[in-house]
Amino acid sequence: MTPARQWAAALAMLAGVALLLQLVLSLRMGLDAGRGALHGLWQFLGYFTVLSNGLVAWLALRGALAADGGRDLRWRGCAVTAIVLVGIGYHLLLREIWNPQGAAWLADLLLHYAVPLAALAWWWVFPPRVRIPASAAGWWLAWPLGYAAYALVRGAMSGFYPYPFVDVPSLGMGRVLGNVAGLCIVFLATGFLLRALAHARQRPA
């Protein structure tokens, strides 16, 4: 197995372990609250962090099975952009609002720090071999926009909003849409930065 495939396999395993641990914790919370395992699963699937870690795990697994280690997978840049912003956003905006302990602390560390750093390193050490078109970063916006629509529909159905900045009852729809627009601008800028990084790494020394 080539180094690129080994790295992709290790990243897929890391993200998979993080997701499995968080799933077990979510199911347990649902059971402990008397609302059942399905409720825990419903909560688990509501977070951008979880879905983005899942996207990374899926693409890294595909990379581990590909001859080139997945370096030129079409949505790899989207996954790396999303997971990098998971780490940055959590560290800057969300880490102070709760204090996980024990297994929850480990899941928090893996999902928000270890996987984002490993995915960014994957992009750095094994950049795409082909030039990334400027339009790609725009297409990658489908991921956060799709999640925003999903989160708002879920929230309207259940009353559960996973993040404070999309909490419609507290903020109002206008402000939430403004928050989504701002986060999408940050996502687009990060995508362009990762595109530039990949192109810089492609240049011969």
Image (spheres, rainbow, N blue to C red):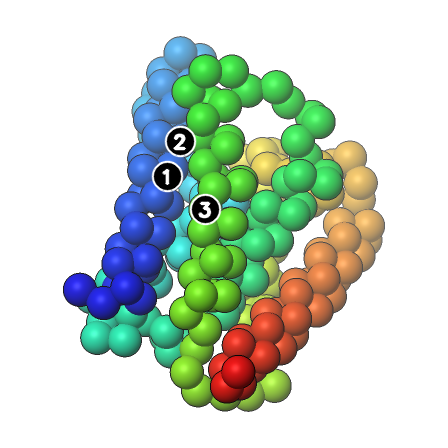
Foreground residue, 25 or 166? 25
Q: Percent x, y for residue 104?
A: 46, 22
Tell me, yes or no, if residue 27 can be seen here. yes
Closer mark to the observer between disc 3 and disc 2: 3
The mark found on residue 19 in the picture is 1
Foreground residue, 202 or 96? 202
Q: Percent x, y for residue 27?
A: 35, 25
Disc 2 and disc 1 in contact, CB within 8 angstroms: yes
**114 lies above or below 1:** above
The mark found on residue 101 in the picture is none
Amino acid type, mark 2: Gln
Residue at image coords 44%, 65%: 125
The mark found on residue 115 in the picture is 3
Based on the displayed image, in which of its 4 quarters is residue 24 positioned?
top left
Which residue carries the number 2 mark?
22
Marked residue nearer the N-terminal end (3 or 2) = 2
Marked residue nearer the N-terminal end (1 or 3) = 1
Helix, strand or loop status at disc 1: helix
Residue at image coords 50%, 66%: 124
Tell me, yes or no, if residue 147 can be seen here. no
Report whether 144 appears left or right of 131: right
User: How busy is the neighbourhood of tag 3: few (under 14 within 10 Å), some, or many (20 plus)?
Assistant: many
User: How busy is the neighbourhood of tag 1: few (under 14 within 10 Å), some, or many (20 plus)?
Assistant: many
Residue that sits furthest to the left in the current view: 1
Residue at image coords 57%, 54%: 84
